[in-house]
Each structure stands twice: as structure tokens, then as C-alpha cells.
Amino acid sequence: MKKSVFYHAGCPVCVSAEHDILELIGEQNVEIVHFGNNKSRIPEAEKAGVKSVPALVTPNGNVLHINYGASMADVKA
Amino acid sequence: MKKSVFYHAGCPVCVSAEHDILELIGEQNVEIVHFGNNKSRIPEAEKAGVKSVPALVTPNGNVLHINYGASMADVKA
């Protein structure tokens, strides 16, 4: 199975959601991308339709915005 | 494992998220509650902290608001 990708920026809401998602979906099924450590992945996330973090992009390309930590504008600031 | 509960109200955003969540977490791990068919579950969801639908309440009681279909006020209207 293709992995989901969980994008976040280290905010408290992100970290809490990351924990829940890993628990629910299984660590082996999710790639975690932290924009703080990896700004080069921002364009790919925006292209996928990520508007805020935390967000999960499913293997079929749907974007699930989970709660609300920060907008992509905040992430890029 | 205790099941997660996915609350929704039949909106297009809800149905799309439901499909993704079932795919990711597995049908056997999620109880689906449709407020349109089951208004009696609204108080329980609000008590859990659900502010909008679709939302997933995890086995440990965290609420993940996934995208945004409708507020609970809309659901109750």
C-alpha cells in the first residue's frame, strides 16, 4: 500500500494529531514531514492541496485537514 | 481495541472523509454515526468536544475535526 503523508510544523496541535494518527493508522503506513526541518517539501504539499497543518494526504491523494494548527502562510513565514 | 467514532451528517465533505477514514483505519475499527439518522447521539458528541462534522473521536478521547462540513449548530438546526 502507498503511504499516507502527514505534514506538520511542530505546533502543539500538530504533535497531538501526529500521535493520534500514528496510533490509528500505524507508523509503518505514514510518512511524517515536519516543515520546520524540511522546508523543501512545502511546494509538494501545496500542490497536493494542503492549506493548513496538520494535514494528512491519503494514498489516493485526498487531503484531510485535521484540526487547525497553522496556515501554510504561517508555515512559510 | 476500543473503536473510534466517526460523526457526520451526510454532507459531501463528510461522505468523502468517511470513505478515506474507513480506508485508512479499517471498517472494523470505526463506528459511524450519522446525525441525520441518529439525532440522539448529538449530546454525546458535543460532550466529547465535537464542534463540527465530520469528526473522529479516537479511542483515547481526542477529537480530530477533519476538513469542515458543517458546524454542530447547523447539524442541530
Image: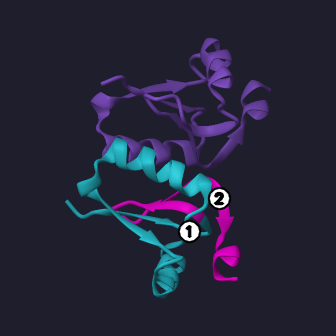
Chain colours: A cyan, B purple
Q: Which disc number belongs to residue A19? A: none
Q: Chain of mark 2?
A: A
Callouts 1 and 2 in the same chain: yes
Label pair 1/2, CB-CB below 8 angstroms:
yes
The Cα atoms of the two marked residues, 1 and 2, are separated by 8 Å
Q: Is residue A50 left or right of residue B18?
A: right
Q: Against A76, is B15 above or below? A: above
Residue A24, image quadrant? top left
Q: Is residue A75 left or right of residue A56?
A: right
Residue B56 in the image: state x and y as whole percent: 51, 36
Q: Residue at x 73, y 32 (%)?
A: B72
Q: Residue at x 51, y 84 (%)?
A: A39
Amino acid type for the residue under numbered disc 1: Ala
Residue A41 in the image: state x and y as whole percent: 46, 82
Where are the magenta residues, as a range? A53-77
Residue A42 in the image: state x and y as whole percent: 52, 82
A30, B7: nearer the viewer: A30
Amino acid type for the residue under numbered disc 2: Gly
- 10 Å neighbourhood of mark 1: few (<14), some, or many (≥20)? many
Q: Chain of mark 1?
A: A
B28, A66: nearer the viewer: A66
Q: Which disc number belongs to residue A9? A: 1
Q: Which disc number belongs to residue A69? A: 2
A57 magenta-colored: yes
